[in-house]
Amino acid sequence: MAAVDAILLAMFLAALHKHSGIIQLVIALVALAANYVYFSKRTMPFKFLLPGLILLTLFVVIPVVYTVEMSFFNYQSGNIITKDAAVTQLINNGLTPDAANTSYDMVLGTDNGGFTALLTNPATHISYIANEKMVVVLNPGEFKTNSKGDAISVPGFKPYTPDEEANLDSVISNAKFPLPNGDFIQPQDTSSASLLTQSVHYDPATGLLKNAATGKTYKDNGNGNFANVDNPKDLLYPGWKSFSKFQNYAHLLSDPNIRGPFIGVFVWTFCFASITVILMFGFGLLLAIALEQKLRFKRFYRSIVILPYAIPSFMSILIWKGMFNTQFGAVNALFHSHIDFFDSPWLARGMVLIVNLWLGLPYFYLISTGALQAIPADLEEAAEMDGATSTQILRQIKLPLLLQILAPLLISSFAFNFNNFNLIYLLTGGGPTDALHGQTAGATDILITYTYKTAFNGANQNYGSASAISMLIFLIVASLSLWSLRRSRVLDLVS
Amino acid sequence: MATQAVKRHKGRISKGHLIAHSYIWVIILFVLFPIYVVIESSFNPTGLLNSGSFIPTQFSWANYHLLLTDPHVPFLRWIFNSILLATGNAVIAVFIGGASAFAFSRMKFRGRKIGLQALLLVQVFPSFLALAAIYVMMERVYTVFPAIGLGSLGGLLLIYLGGSMGVNIWLLRGYIDTIPMELDEAARIDGASTPQVYWLIFFPLAAPVLAVTALLAFIGTFNEFILASIFLTDVHQRTVAVGLNSFVGAQFGQNWGPFAAGSLMASIPLVILFLSLQRFIIGGLTQGATKG
């Protein structure tokens, strides 16, 4: 316990050092809970529960809550930072060279240890000594000049060697020497600087942002950006992460750029999950029935048939991807053809179903066998006595019973395939995508791969929209699972 | 009449057998097709299958050699990362999950019922659905603790542990419920404390189901792709799933042979593990089938 406390304390101090408020709070809470639970005598159950609870809370509950939160925010590329940071950046971006393009010759060095520049305006031959607090005019005689008349030395000033300058690269490129009127002199490289004037002004009282150079006025549009007062579509970037109510959800249905692909993906996800379960169940059940009979080599057949279940699935998917390759793939070699399975939407969809059948067949064979064996043998005998044929027995007695036994597993398999990211992402990457016509979703994209693309692929990362789709998937999968749990009465067992 | 009926009956059986046999063989060919192709290409120095011939003509270890020695493809490192993550997740999940499951199964405390129901709900939410949130969160953790933040195996392990905890607790609790109550009552009469009951009675008794839970967690982690792919960017930190995908994704034609060799090497341990433990795993599956 002492060791745990020591580690937590060290982590807390590290977080304190970085001014990371939320992380500090989390660590403090964990430490308090752990100390209370393991030192008190009345908390025996929680001595067992705590580690699991902490892991669940930190890495499942908090991300879920955060997902819900993000789904209500305008949170995407260009709208990531806070409003204050966005204003600061906009003001920085508002620095522009002055009308005359004034520039200076510059010598960098230290003056009594501080970062200092000697600047000379080659047009006026006025020299300055500047640091990041102020710029002061040097009187003639106070400094030594070179042949061009540029100031190169004052008493106490020590110029940098080229090596030192190379090491100070980031300091130099970020340095700004402020003039009394609000303008800046900024280094362009290690030997020259230019005069920048501030064209953007922000008034915190009115919330207005004015650009003196263009004469435009911008106002907070309530959705994470400053917008031109005269033209609301003229937005300034960067914006900030801002609360947008149900906009992310509404856009899924109203924004034509999002709605089209979203509905297509939605329909295909349902089709894919149901067709794949029906196929796997059909073939798996037939296999179970076939292997129920008295056959030679039955054990041998069984162990071959369940092989796909033992091979890591991501590997199998990548292997199939190679097998369907146009030029050298084994499938094309088998049929002496050159079909590009990854280019045609329908071939790609068929391919996805075939590969998934290969992956899922063993599981469905196994659960069907289990269920067939769970059906009492006397039922079959009784039906035989009444003169039923084996087809009749299968169709009218075994199948309904099987469906009843297997319903929860079929549902959970549907839910699994509804989110079968590995299969789609590794096999087709969601493609083929008609990028020429501006499509963002491919023919085989399912909701979860589309979410992934929305959140992480491409130049525009939209966390808000991705979270909204995640919430939708969760609602669908959760209601399916709850329904099947209720059916199988697992919930009653709890109480 | 009687003999005729018997004959017809026999004829039907053999016909049924024939159909069954041919169906089984179609499935077996379907199942074996990619496995055969991979084995064949892994030993084929050209790594290609465009000749149209499926009978191996050449044999060499070149693909294996290339994969194990190419400095740009740290294959062994990927395998090591995957095994590290999978073992870490399996072992820790069983210890922590087992303790929680024990508390839910055997102890009375306020919030037990709500806790169990919440657990069910959490279990339904796959952790990769929150991937955007996890990404942003771990990005922030990285600024304070690089060792468990974005891009680190440690951070990924924590997320896997959290994500699998719900299922594991639920699975283990079901099993502990079936261990008779009399056993711990007897131990208590002999003066055992609760932790003693847990360590000396439950842990050994639940060993088989703990092993299966650990194995399932191991396989699940080994196969996980989505979180690992957004999480691990450095080529040396990758898991074998992420690494092989980027390796083969870059140049399928050229890398197919070494890829086949790599997938065989990575699969064989798992296949052996699976086949030797299949009795337990399949037992768990069919139990699920009848219990729901």
Image (tube, helix red, strand yellow):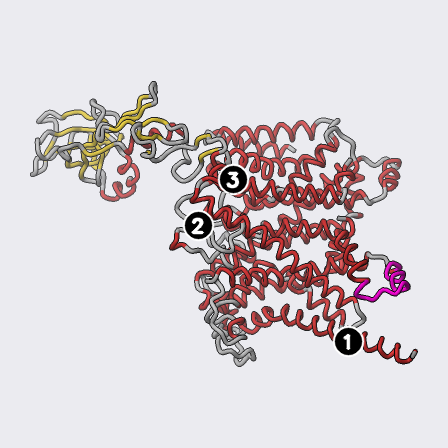
Range shown magenta? A378-392
Question: Considering depth in this image, is B284 or B96 the residue closer to the camera?
Answer: B284
Q: Earlier in the sequence, mark 3 or mark 2?
A: 2
The C terminus of chain A - image quarter? top right
The answer to if B98 sits in the magenta stretch is no
User: Helix, strand or loop at disc 1?
Assistant: helix
Which residue is identified by label 1? B15
Q: Is residue B277 left or right of residue B229?
A: right
Which residue is identified by label 3? A467
Q: Position of residue A68 (x, y in %)?
A: 54, 35
Q: Are marks 3 and 1 in contact (CB under 8 Å)?
A: no
Q: Chain of mark 3?
A: A
Question: Spatial distance from mark 3 to mark 1, Cα to Cα?
Answer: 56 Å
Q: Position of residue A83 (x, y in %)?
A: 39, 29
> How many marks overall?
3
Question: Considering depth in this image, is B275 or B64 the residue closer to the camera?
Answer: B275
Of discs 3 and 1, which sits in the foreground? 1
Badge 2 amino acid: Thr
Residue farthest right in this picture: B2
Q: Tag on residue A440?
A: 2
Q: Is residue A42 left or right of residue B186?
A: left
Q: Quadrant of residue A93?
A: top left
Question: Spatial distance from mark 1 to mark 2, Cα to Cα?
Answer: 53 Å
Question: Spatial distance from mark 3 to mark 2, Cα to Cα?
Answer: 17 Å
Q: Chain of mark 2?
A: A
Q: Position of residue A438 (x, y in %)?
A: 39, 51
Residue under the image location 56 percent in, 39 percent down: A471
Residue under the image location 67 percent in, 49 percent down: A412
Residue farthest front in this picture: B1
Residue farthest top in this picture: A205
